[in-house]
Image (cartoon, helix red, strand yellow):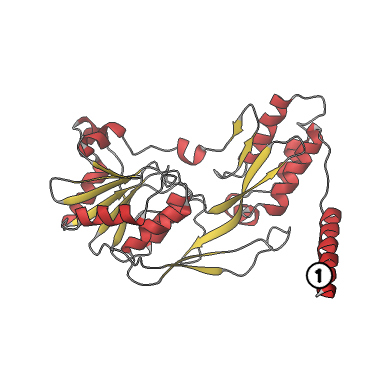
Amino acid sequence: MNKTFLFLCFLMSLLATTACVDEEEFDDTPQGNFEALWRIIDEHYCFLDYKQHEIGLDWQAIYNKYKVRVDDGMGDLQLFEVLTQMLGELRDGHVNLTAAHDYGRYWRWFEDYPTNFSDSLCRIYMGTDYKIASGLQYRILDDNIGYVRYESFQSGIGEGNLDEVLMYLMLCQGLIIDIRGNGGGDLTNAEKLAARFCNEKTLVGYMQHKTGPGHTEFSEMEARYLHPSSNIRWQKPVVVLTNRHVFSAANEFTMYMKALPQVKIVGDHTGGGAGMPFSSSLPNGWSVRFSAVPTYDASRHSTEFGIEPDYYVALTADDFAKGRDTMIEFARQLLVQ
C-alpha cells in the first residue's frame, strides 16, 4: 500500500515537472502577450487546418502580418485592438478576447446578413395571453398549429416544463419551434428539447479531440447520438425556424433536429459555431476563449460555418407591411399540407 502511494506521488511529480518543461513562458509585454496569444491559437485552436482549406487561412502568414504592428511602447488599448483584429481573421464567433475595458469579438457571421426576424411581428402572433414555461413561450395559433418560441438555450427548461407544453399542444396539427436569434447557451437544454422529437437512438453527428499541437493532430471521429426522451414525445410534423443569428448550442439543436424524419428546417442558413470553446489566459491576465473541440454532422461535415435549411425563406417587406411573418406563414402552410 505504501509502495503504491509512493509510486503515485513520484508519477504525479514527474508529470508536473514535464508540464513545466513543455510549457513556454512569455513576458508580460506587448510582444510577449502577442506571442502567447498566437501560440495558444496555433497549438490548441481546432479549425486551423479546416479553415485553411475553406477560406485560405494561413496562420503563419497572420503571425507575420500582425507581429510588425506590435511594439513594447504601445499601450493596452492599442494592443487589444491589434490582438482582436488578429483573432478576427479566424472568422469564429466562439473566439473572444476579454479585458477589463473591452470584449473583443467576431460577429460578422450574423452582422453581414439580414436578421429575418422581427420582434414586433412576433408579438402579433404571440399576443398577450401566451403561456410561459421557464425558457419557453408558447401558444396555439388560430389554424390549430402550435408555436413555441425559445430565445436562448441559456434559459433552462425542465422535463416537467416540456411535459406541460407538449400536453397543452397535443391536439395541434403540427408544431413550429422558433429559435431565430438564439445565440446558443447550455447544450444540455438543446439535447433535452430535441429528445422530445426522437423515437429511437439516432446518429446526429461526430466529434474529435486535439491530441497534439499540430494543426491536423486529432483523435478518431467519435459518434454522437440523440436518445429518445423517456417522457412525453411529439409524433407530428415539426418546423424549426432559423436565421443567421442561430449559433453554437442553437446550431447544434438545428443539427439534431435535421437528423429526425418528421422535422423540416425553414428560414436562413444558421450562423454556425461548431467548436466547443475552451479558455486560456495571457501573461497580462487577459482571457482568450477559442474553439477547441470540433463537431460534425451525421455526414461528417463540419457545421462551423452553419447549416442550410430545407427551405430558404426570408421576411419580405410586403408581408412586414401587412403584419405577416413570411417564415411563420410558410411553416404553417407546410404543416397543413
Image point (13%, 45%), residue name: 142
Q: Is residue 92 left or right of residue 173?
A: right
Q: Is residue 214 above or below residue 121?
A: below
User: The C terminus is located in which quarter?
Assistant: bottom left
Residue 263 image point, x, y percent: 30, 60
In the depicted view, which residue is nearer to us: 40 or 23? 23
Residue 51 appears anywhere in the view: yes
As helix, strand or loop, the secondary structure at mark 1 comes to: helix
Image point (38%, 37%), residue name: 115
**Few, some or many C-alpha atoms within 10 Å of disc 1 (few <14, some 14-19, many ≥20)?**
few
Image point (19%, 58%), residue name: 170
Determine which residue is flagged by label 1.
Answer: 5
Image point (35%, 57%), residue name: 159
Q: Is residue 194 left or right of residue 14?
A: left
Q: Is residue 296 left or right of residue 336?
A: right
Residue 102: name its quadrant: top right
- Which amino acid type is shown beneath numbered disc 1? Phe
Residue 307 appears anywhere in the view: no
